[in-house]
């Protein structure tokens, strides 16, 4: 079996990358990915960049001409419901997007039922849907307005699975909660993303200079995102092992009650 795991940015991937001997390789001319063998399975990791346009383009490059069996699109998400807390691991039964993108790409995307069952065994909370937003939703009032639409909001899963499932038979969207429904992000991160979908450190520094009061919030977000990334790495280790047919054990503190 050979699987593709996509993250938007390096910060989401970093804890998992440190645990395994991922080696960079050129999956297509000019497109770098990472490869490791975990639990006997070849795992290809691709960083799509932030946002739907970058996700669609990069996933096309990651899948073109490759023999891949399963796609796991993952990373961070913002909670849209109060029962979802920071570092919870959610697996969505379906992914929706705004009306324009849904019309272009065929409506809803569903995660594979078999993969959902394995995700639940490995400690994920199964939820009805993710909303793949065209832009980052950072204000509590905006997240609260989407509560009836989905359980969590992110930006890439719809495009990743739309492309991946054209080439492979199974796919799933799994996300770690990095911010709750009732909190604002400390800065407008949409303004810091460059044309490649990557977070620009220069733009981040510029925003901090203009709004130094955001520093405590950024430190807090960094700590919570780090915990979310570590829990996501724990889940992915169990999940790949389960895909390989190995038994997995989930401790009580790795699954939080709703």
Image (spheres, rainbow, N blue to C red):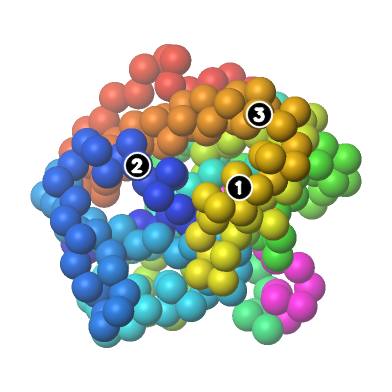
Q: Nearer the viewer, residue 93 or 195?
A: 195
77 sits left or right of 63 in the view: right
Q: Considering only vertical position in the picture, is 53 above or below 1?
A: below
Of badges 2 and 1, the one in the foreground is 1
Q: Which of the two discs, 2 and 3, labels the residue nearer the N terminus?
A: 2
Looking at the rendering, which quadrant does residue 207 occupy?
top right
The reply to whether callout 2 and callout 1 are in contact (CB within 8 Å) is no
Q: Check disc 2 and report the residue beneath it.
A: 14
Q: Check disc 3 and report the residue beneath it.
A: 215
Judged from the image, the secondary structure of the residue bearing numbered disc 3 is: helix
- Look at the image and tell me in which quarter the C terminus lies: top right
Judged from the image, the secondary structure of the residue bearing numbered disc 1 is: helix
Check residue 220 in the rendering and tell me which mark sits there, or answer none: none
Check residue 204 in the rendering and tell me which mark sits there, or answer none: 1
The reply to whether callout 2 and callout 3 are in contact (CB within 8 Å) is no
Query: Could you tell me how far apart the alpha carbons at marks 2 and 3 are, in whole angstroms?
Result: 22 Å
**Which region is colored magenta?**
91-103
Q: Considering only vertical position in the picture, is 82 above or below 172?
A: above
131 sits left or right of 257 in the view: right
Judged from the image, the secondary structure of the residue bearing numbered disc 2 is: helix
- Is residue 157 visible to us here? no
- Look at the image and tell me in which quarter the N terminus lies: bottom left
């Amino acid at each position: 079996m050979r699987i593709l795991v996509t993250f938007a940015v390096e910060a989401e991937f970093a804890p998992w990358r440190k645990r395994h001997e991922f080696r960079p390789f050129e999956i297509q001319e000019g497109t770098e990915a990472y490869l490791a063998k975990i639990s006997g399975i070849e795992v290809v990791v691709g960083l799509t960049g932030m946002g739907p346009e970058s996700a669609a383009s990069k996933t096309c490059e990651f899948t073109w001409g490759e023999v891949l069996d399963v796609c796991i699109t993952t990373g961070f998400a913002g909670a849209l419901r109060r029962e979802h807390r920071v570092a919870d691991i959610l697996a969505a039964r379906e992914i929706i997007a705004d009306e324009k993108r849904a019309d272009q790409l065929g409506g809803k995307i569903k995660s594979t039922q078999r993969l959902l069952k394995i995700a639940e065994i490995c400690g994920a909370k199964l939820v009805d849907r993710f909303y793949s937003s065209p832009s980052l939703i950072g204000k509590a009032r905006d997240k609260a307005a989407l509560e009836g639409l989905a359980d969590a909001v992110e930006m890439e899963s719809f495009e990743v699975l739309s492309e991946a499932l054209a080439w492979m038979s199974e796919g799933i969207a799994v996300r770690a909660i990095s911010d709750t429904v009732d909190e604002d992000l400390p800065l407008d991160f949409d303004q810091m993303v460059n044309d490649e979908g990557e977070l620009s450190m220069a733009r981040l520094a510029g925003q901090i200079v203009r709004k130094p009061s955001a520093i405590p919030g950024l430190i807090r977000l960094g700590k919570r995102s780090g915990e979310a990334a570590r829990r996501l790495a724990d889940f992915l280790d169990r999940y790949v092992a389960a895909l390989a047919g190995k038994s997995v054990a989930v401790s009580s503190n790795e699954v939080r009650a709703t």
